[in-house]
């Protein structure tokens, strides 16, 4: 593989790049629910890079639901076992034990 940093080679390689322009939700690329897009611009030179899916609240809700789905499946190791308050109490109990022992 030739990894030269020749300006022509870089320009040629950049011209061959294909941008994914759809939203990646639930493991697949899909257009926004409205079908709307917006121009993604290169901040260095102001040139348009691609037309990208303009996601709306419906798309965000769809993505959030897809992200939550595995957490609800039984046996998932990432599934929260306790409420955040209960986890804090459990982590604080060794501190409370040590504090009480030091006061004796």
Image (cartoon, helix red, strand yellow):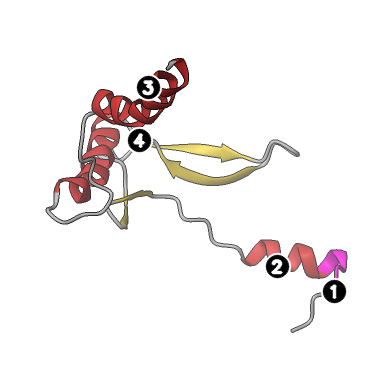
Pick whichever of labels 2 and 3 is earlier in the sequence.
2
Q: Main secondary structure of the magenta part?
A: loop
In front: 61, or 68?
68
Pick whichever of labels 1 and 4 is earlier in the sequence.
1
Disc 1 versus disc 2: nearer the observer: 1
Where residue 30 sits in the image (x, y, percent)?
30, 52
Location of mark 3 (residue) = 96
Which residues, given as a range, are shown in magenta? 4-8
Pick whichever of labels 4 and 2 is earlier in the sequence.
2
In front: 49, or 68?
68
Q: Is residue 72 above or below residue 4?
A: above
In the image, 42: left or right of 98? Answer: right
Disc 2 versus disc 3: nearer the observer: 3
Instruction: Measure the alpha-carbon separation of dots 4 and 2.
Output: 29 Å
Regarding mark 4 in the picture, which secondary structure is present there?
loop
Looking at the image, do the residues carrying marks 1 and 2 touch, with CB atoms under 8 Å apart?
no
Disc 4 versus disc 3: nearer the observer: 3
Pick whichever of labels 3 and 1 is earlier in the sequence.
1
Location of mark 2 (residue) = 13
Regarding mark 1 in the picture, which secondary structure is present there?
loop
Instruction: Measure the alpha-carbon separation of dots 3 and 1.
Output: 61 Å
Instruction: Measure the alpha-carbon separation of dots 4 and 3.
Output: 48 Å
Pick whichever of labels 1 and 2 is earlier in the sequence.
1
Where residue 20 sits in the image (x, y, percent)?
46, 55
Query: Which residue appears farthest toward the top when viewing the image?
Result: 103
Q: Which image quarter is the C terminus in?
A: top left
Location of mark 1 (residue) = 4
Q: Residue 89: which disc?
A: none
Location of mark 4 (residue) = 55
Looking at the image, do the residues carrying marks 4 and 3 touch, with CB atoms under 8 Å apart?
no
């Amino acid at each position: 593989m030739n990894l030269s940093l020749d300006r022509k080679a870089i320009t040629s390689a950049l011209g061959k790049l294909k941008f994914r322009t759809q939203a990646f939700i639930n493991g697949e690329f899909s257009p926004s629910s409205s079908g709307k897009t917006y121009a993604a611009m290169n901040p260095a030179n102001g040139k348009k890079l691609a037309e990208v899916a303009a996601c709306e609240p419906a798309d965000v809700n769809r993505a959030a639901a897809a992200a939550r789905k595995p957490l609800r499946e039984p046996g998932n190791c990432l599934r929260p076992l306790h409420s955040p308050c209960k986890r804090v109490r459990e982590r604080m109990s060794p501190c409370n034990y040590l504090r009480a022992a030091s006061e004796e």
